[in-house]
Image (tube, grey):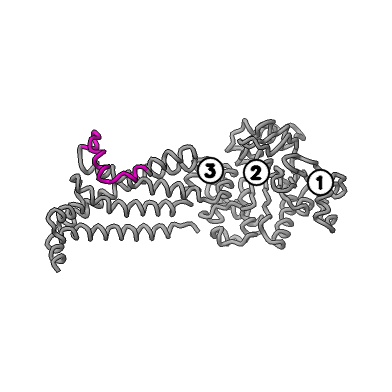
Amino acid sequence: MNVFYFFLQHHEEILDLTLEHLWLVGISTLLAVLIGIPLGIVSAHWPVWNKPILGTANIIQTVPSLALFGFLLPVPWIGARADRLAILALTLYALLPVIRNTYTGIRGVDPSVVEAGRGMGLTDRQLVFQVELPLAVSVILSGVRVAVVVSVGLATIAAAIGAGGLGEFIFRGLAMVNNELILAGAIPAAILALSADFGLGWLERRLRPR
Amino acid sequence: METIPANGPVIDFRDVVYTLPNGQPLLQNLNLQVQGGETLVLLGRSGSGKTTTLKLINRLLTPSGGEVRVNGALTAENDVIRLRRSIGYVIQDVGLFPHFTVERNIGLVPRIEGWPAERIQLRVEELLQLVRLDSQIASRYPHQLSGGQRQRVGVARALAADPAILLMDEPFGAVDAITRDQLQREFLSLQQRLNKTVVFVTHDLREALRLGSRIALMEAGRLVTVLSPQDFLRSSDPLAAAYVQAFGEGLDSAANRGTS
């Protein structure tokens, strides 16, 4: 019951922090998509690049998130503001699923389709944009979905470096041993993750080629 | 088109060698000429080099040695995209784009060549008629078609920009016997009207005899012999004789006596 009243009382602050959270996740996912898809295309087409690209993304993934925030702190422009730093860190984490699924999606396109396209005189660019990407789109989207769900959780930690978001409540609640505060951060974060998962999952099924 | 020497071969292989990057030779010393308007069938077992030969024509593969000429020009020196768009290509798995409708599949080369939309649409209708498909299937997707219909769409797509040369890699290999018979019959009547230069890959002697004006027999990366269907049946070449024996009785009636 107390939680309910707490939510009512603090609904403005909860809304603000939720929007901040969404912004962190949204921008970082967008950046990860803009960087990750081209990298995925490169590693699918030039096997030489496959290991270095996926390997690097893999290593980044293994760095504990708090430590990554710490590593990025001294970086000039980035370290100057907490939200920049948080966005960069979240982007780096989101890269792996996007790159890996772009790679898998393109590699999974029926070779006879690609060969027919090549044989008919499609240029490499036309093959990528008219054949490979449209056929890989649902696999790529499922990578984006994983990235978003992971980012929503990770972004709560960004509050530790003062980047805001729903983590604010959680850290405050931990410090004050106040369960209502923790739930005020955790519940909206869980709802965000679930709805992103559901929405992108729906989109993924709609775009799946027959 | 470039200036073609009168009566010169449309496709000309001279001492062509193709070796895999790991050194394994797939094709050795191939000399073969394809004349305008003929249907040359490359007959052989899997691994004999027939598909490799075909892919050297539209430069999906580049020769390791020797030269391939199309209409007198070295393929290695031609703009590869132009070359491929001037040659129709049909493969066994058809390779229709699953995310395109039949109409978009057939109109692909015209579209990337920048034809106006109305002209593409007219061309698609014309081609559907040519391969005897109902114009209603234009808006369907490949997965909604039968195997035979898909093959027809594949042929229509290859013919879309009216190429003078058609490359066909076991195009009727994956359909049932009755459909294959039908498709072969239609191919013959189509070829009589269109008079394309066709290179046709198959491992089926019956198909080779029926469709080919000449049969190039290949084995283990080498061209064994080139014979007309009639001569193939009477050939004393041991490999040709082995084929005739393996395919059994009744081949005489299958042999192409066409006028082409």
Chain under numbered label 1: B
Q: Amino acid at mark 3?
A: Gly
Q: Specify few, some or many for label 3: CA neighbours under 10 Å numbering under 14, 14-19, or 20 or more.
A: few
Q: Specify few, some or many for label 1: CA neighbours under 10 Å numbering under 14, 14-19, or 20 or more.
A: some
Q: Dot 2 corresponds to which residue? A: B163
Tag in front: 1 or 2: 1
Q: Amino acid at mark 2?
A: Pro
For the point 15% across and 62% down, the residue is A7
- Left or right: residue A11 versus residue A147 is left
In magenta, the rendered stretch is: A59-79
Instruction: Decide which of tag 3 and tag 1 comes sooner along the chain.
Output: 3
Q: Dot 3 corresponds to which residue? A: B114
Q: Is residue B155 visible to us here? A: no
Q: Quadrant of residue A95?
A: top left
In three-dimensional space, the C-alpha distance between marks 3 and 1, rounded to whole angstroms, equals: 48 Å
The N terminus of chain B - image quarter: top right
Q: Is residue A92 visible to us here? A: yes
Relative to A105, does residue B35 appear above or below in the rendering?
A: above
Q: Dot 1 corresponds to which residue? A: B239
Q: Give residue B248's position: percent from left, percent from top.
A: 83, 57
For the point 52% across and 49% down, the residue is B117
